[in-house]
Amino acid sequence: MKFFMNPTSPNLLLRLLGGLGGLLLCTGAGAQEKITYNDHIRPIFRQHCFTCHDTDGRSADLALDNYRDAIAGGASGEVVASGDAGESRLWQLMAHLDEPIMPPSGDKIPEGQLKRVKAWIDGGLLENSGSKAMERKISAVASFVPSADNHPTGDPAMPGRFFREPVVHSQQMGTVAEVAASPWAPVIAVAGQRQVLLYHSDTYQLLGVVPFVVGTPEVIRFSRNGDLLLVAGGRGAALGVVHLWDLKAGRRIAELGDEIDTILAADLRADHSLVALGGPRKRVKVLRTADGSVAYEITKHTDWVTALEFSPDGKTLVTGDRSGGVHLWEAATGRPIATLAGHKGPITSVSWRGDSQVVATASDDRTVHLWKTDGTTIRQWEAHGGGVLDVSFNKAGQLVTSGRDKTAKLWESNGQQVRQITAMDDLALSIITTHDDTHAVVSDWRGEVRVVATDSGKEAAKLTPNPPTLEMRLKAAERESKRIETQIGPAENAIAGASNAVDAAVKQIAAHRALEKACQQTLAQLREILGQCMAELKTDQAALATAEQSIAVRVEERQPIESELKALESQFAAVSNQQGEDAEATETDPLKAAVAASKEKLAAADAKLQTAQAAKTPLQQAKSTAEAAASMASTKVSQQEKLLAELENQAAQLPSVEKLTTQRELLQSELARIVAAYQRKATQIEVIQAEQATFRAAEDQWTEQIAKHQVEIRDQSAQLARLSGRLAKEKASAEAVLTQIADLAKRLSELKKTDQQLADIAGKTGASVREMADALAALEAERSEIERLLTDRKTAQALRNPKPKGD
């Protein structure tokens, strides 16, 4: 810009200073108008908003009277989203698209002003004409709308894409200060050394390792919908951070906080918008998850903050400290609600009931207290001798606690103990129930972690906070695989032997059955022969009986003849004796004839008897033969029956094919089990090897990235060193320029006096134009010098306050 100077002006120095001021304010001729906070928006805010939202008032902790505070937002977070007026809370309320409408009383802001506010937000929230559009901040933490039970909209999140390579594997167990469980999925989180271990609460298998290499994880929390995992902790008197992990993706999505001491208490609000943290610095800091900025701080605690938790509905925050102080706060603004006075020892744990109406506090004073949200006490009871170290509500509204007496207990909400769940070997530090309330997870000072059934106290599993490395697991799997492989050969041999035994038994039984069948056939034949013999014997006996009956008949027939003959002979003898030898034949002849006739009859009867007796003899021989044959057949039948009985006895003693087959099937099942175990182990080895390869590839990528970052850091460090040297020089130069400007300001003041004196002289004496021209020439030289000094000053300021990279 050139200055137009009127040589006849009596007030040339004042015009010169005016032109200089124009130089300082000028933005450049012909520049396109930009909607900026300083030039366009602040006047609108001044007219309509400053009454409530200035630096002094800060209604809802929102100040609009300066750019920095307007961008930062208020108690509920940012109110403007760069590039998107529709998503900006401030625009929604000013345009009366949502409530509470702004301004709260009076008419809607004029449409032209609303358009300017919208254009300012859509244009990137420019502060002034020299600003560049602000990049819109897109939070990596997905928001969630709390519901009555905070159930996730889809399937409950299970860990995905986490490596199972531990960050640390130690020879000794460390203290397990914290355990946690997903509210909706079978997932358990266990704090280890610089890591958090994720286990399946049904199978107790390791699902993944969440690294926390910055220090010791002191706090583990699942989000209310189970999608996110919060891990907080650090190193004492050195560092404290909060990490948020997307459970399904296995990816860390935020690192919040940069504390100078470890974090002892932390929680994530139900809608995922805020994270509260506290520790040895005696203050609670609440950060926005979108950008890590501080929403508000609570400084009321007078001792270490040891416990805190947002209510399930996200409306209230409870905090506790080492001196027994407990307070309730509005979660959105940090405004105090109530002080819960009653504990006489350090607060160790707090827990909200699912309906957000009751909060439980535990203390080293051995008691558990239940409170309403207005701060009134519901009840209290002594829970553990020596002190209560943890308390947690389950979904049924019961409480589980653990304490210095090494026990874990289950309580009704009226303070009635249901049962002692388990007794640990050392101080029971932490307790939580699984997603289905069936089991409790308890950890102690020695690093033991037990999963115990809440209804019986029966131990279901032990979880290690110190899992083996992939290399150790691979070697163990290979050893086990070799051990299983050595069992396959003997099992196969045993099956072969069993099969041979079955085959031999089958053949033996078949041979025995054939012999038994032949014996049965022979026995049947012998019995048939015996039957025939007995039939023949019976026939012979009948014939013999008939013959004997015929003989008896003949004998009976002969007897009267013989008697008659004897009688005739006796009579003949008697007659003969009486008459003598000389008796007349006439008296004896009839007797002789009768005797002779009787003798003939007797001879005929004897002949018949002899014939009958002769017929009996072959019959007797046939009977004897039949009897001998029947006896022999009977003997053979008896022998065959005895042989068959022996064969049947032997059959009972033969090996059972069914039993041998069953044994073979059992051996085959055992072999199948061994082979299946071998195959599973082989698959496990392949999985571990693949996981190792993936982890090593990722490790190589990390190493490469670290190397690149180290190079970048070295380059940036070198550049920073150069800039520091230049800044030091420019600072000295700028200080010299500022000194010169101060001198020039003093000289300008003197020139003003001179200008007045020249004007007086010109008026009084009528100084010549040449003298005035000389004076103007001198002033022009002074002006050029001032412009040069101002340029140097701007350059120095730019070097002292370089713009961020990318602006």
Image: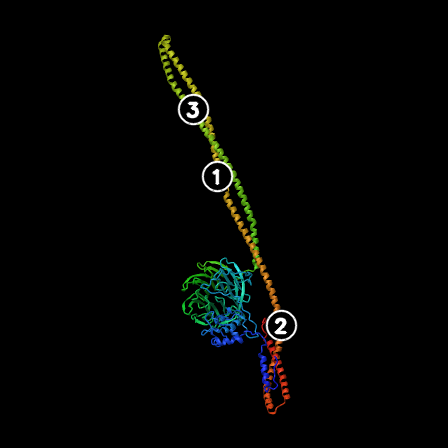
Three-letter amino acid code at disc 2?
Answer: Gln
Q: 267 or 301, which lies in front?
A: 267
286 horizontally vs 606: left or right:
right
Q: Secondary structure at mark 2?
A: helix
Say which amino acid is labelled 1: Asn
Q: Secondary structure at mark 1?
A: helix
Cα distance, mark 1 to mark 3? 44 Å
If you read the primary sequence from the N terminus, does the residue marked by circle 2 or circle 1 appear first?
1
Could you tell me which residue is drawn at 54 percent across and 42 percent down? 503
- Determine which residue is flagged by label 2: 719
How far is the residue under mark 2 from the one under mark 1?
105 Å
Tell me the residue at 47%/37% (across/down): 645
**Res 649 label:** 1
Q: Amino acid at mark 3?
A: Leu
Residue marked by disc 3: 544
Measured as percent of width and height from the top left, residue 66 is found at 52, 76
Q: Residue at x 58, y 78 (%)?
A: 26
Question: Is there a contact, CB below 8 Å, between mark 2 and mark 3?
Answer: no
Observer-nearest of 551 and 23: 23
Left/right placement of residue 703 relative to residue 371 reads right
Circle 2/circle 1 CB separation < 8 Å: no
Q: Position of residue 587 (x, y in %)?
A: 36, 9
- Label 1: how many residues lie within 10 Å, few (<14), some (14-19) or many (20+)? few
Label 3: element kind: helix
* Mark number displayed over residue 518: none
Q: Residues within 10 Å of mark 2 (few under 14, many from 20)?
A: few
Q: Quadrant of the N terminus?
A: bottom right
